[in-house]
Image (spheres, rainbow, N blue to C red):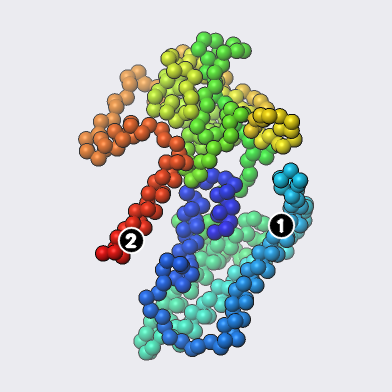
Amino acid sequence: VLLQVFIIMTGNYNFFNLLTITLCISLLDDSSSLFTQPRYRVGGKKQSKAWTVLQKIANIVFPVVVLGYISYMSVILFSLKFNNDYTVSSKIAFTKEQFTNWLEKIMPYTIYLGAASLGLEVVTSFIRSLIVEKGLTRKLMCVLGTVFFSLVAVFMFTISLVPHTIVHKPAQGILPRAVFTYHGLTRPFHVTSSYGLFRRMTGVGGRPELIIEGHAKDRQAADGWLTYEFLYKPGNVSEAPPIVAPHQPRLDWQMWFAALGNYQNNPWFLNLVCRLLQNQPEVLQLLAHNPFPDKPPKYIRATLYHYHYTSPKDCAGKTRCDWWKREEKHTYLPGFSLEDKAFADYLKASKILQDEPPKKFKPDSFIAKMVLWFRGQVGQPEGFGFTVSLFGSAILVIFLSRAIKSVV
C-alpha cells in the first residue's frame, strides 16, 4: 500500500494504484479494520501477561527496525542529501555491474524463500484440517479440499517463477524445462504475469512533448504560427503543472505516447489534426484554448520538444521564473492541410474524412437524452475537481446511509 501511495505522489496512473490498494486492503483480517469487528469472539486459552507484553513490544520494535533499515539503506545506496535550499539531491551510489551481481546472488534465495513460505502455509493448513475440524467426515472433506487448493497453489507458484525471474534471465537456468512448458500452455489465459507498468523509464534526458501549432495562410512562414494549449500536459513554459490524479485525461495521455514515436504509428494523431483543421467543437472542448475561434487554420504542424524543470539556480535573483525550460528536437509533423491531396486521400481511405457528414447520434431513450443534455450544460469540467467531487459525494452518501440506518 505504501508503494502505491508513493507512486500516486510521483505520477498519474489514473485509478490503477487506488484499485491495487483496494485489493491489498481486502487481504487484511477483519480484526485489522477500524470499521469492521467480528460479531462474536471464539474463546481460547488466555495468554500470560509476559507473553502479551512481549507481543506488544515486538509489534512496535519490529516495524521500527525494518523501516529504519530500509531508510538507512536508501540514504546509503542513493546518496540522499538535504541541501540548505530545502531541496533533496540524490545520486545512485552503485554501478550496473554491482546491481547485476547482487541480482545474481539474491534471485535463487527469493525462489527458496517463496517455496518455503508456501510449504509452511500448506503444512499449517493440513494441521488445521486435522485438529480444528470435528468428526471424521468433516476432517476428510477438509483434507481433500486442502489437497486440491494446495496443488493449485503449488502449480500457480511454479509457473509464476518464469515471469518472476525475467528481471534476471540467467536465474531462469535453475528452473526445470517443464516449468516453461506449463507456463507456455497457460500464457494465453494470463494466469500469471510479471509486475511492471512502463518499466522502461521515459523522460530521461528530457520529457518529450508535442507542440501543435496552426497557421492561417502560409505553410513556410516563420511567424504567425499560433499554439494549441492543452488542459493538462506541459506546453506553455510559464504554466505550473496542474493536479490531475486520479483523473486521467485521455487526449493529453495519448499525446505523451505519440511523442515517444512518430505520427505514422499514431493514426489517431492525424485524426486530431483533421478535426483541428475543421474546428470541430467536440475536439476543441478537450483543449484549453483555441487560437482560431472565428475560422479554422489552413495548416497544422507539430514540433517535438524536450522539457526540463527549472532548477533553483535558474531562478536565482528573478522575481518571476518559468516552470519549464525546453529545447527543440525536430519537426514531428510538417505543415499539413486538408488541401494536400496525399493527406486528404489518406483521411478518406481511413474514413476519417468523408464526402457526406456522418449522421448525428439521436438518442431514443429518456436517460440517454438527459445524459447528453447534462453533458452539454456542463461542457468540459476540470478533471481533478470533478473526480474528487464524485468520490466525495459517494463517501458522503455511504456515511449518511449508515447514520440514517443507525437512527432508524
Quadrant of the image occupied by residue 87: top right
Res. 320 visible in picture? yes
Q: Which mark is residue 74?
A: 1
Quadrant of the image occupied by residue 382: top left
Q: Is residue 88 left or right of residue 250?
A: right
- The percent coordinates of residue 212 (x first, y second) are 54, 24
Mark 1 surroundings within 10 Å by alpha-carbon count, few (fewer than 14), some (14 through 19), many (20 or more):
some
For mark 2, what is the residue? 403
Instruction: Determine the residue positioned at 73% across, 61% down.
Output: 72
Disc 1 vs disc 2: which is toward the camera?
Answer: 2
Is 29 in front, or is 238? Answer: 238
Quadrant of the image occupied by residue 307: top right
The C terminus - image quarter = bottom left
In the depicted structure, whether residue 95 falls above or below residue 240: below
Q: CA distance from mark 1 to mark 2?
A: 45 Å
Res. 306 visible in picture? no
In the depicted structure, whether residue 29 falls above or below residue 127: above
Q: Secondary structure at mark 2?
A: helix
Q: Which mark is residue 165?
A: none
Instruction: Determine the residue positioned at 64% across, 39% down.
Output: 203
The total of numbered circles placed on residues is 2
Under mark 2, the amino acid is Ala
The N terminus - image quarter = bottom right
- The percent coordinates of residue 28 (x first, y second) are 48, 67
Is 16 in front, or is 97? Answer: 16
- The percent coordinates of residue 149 (x first, y second) are 45, 73
Mark 2 surroundings within 10 Å by alpha-carbon count, few (fewer than 14), some (14 through 19), many (20 or more):
few
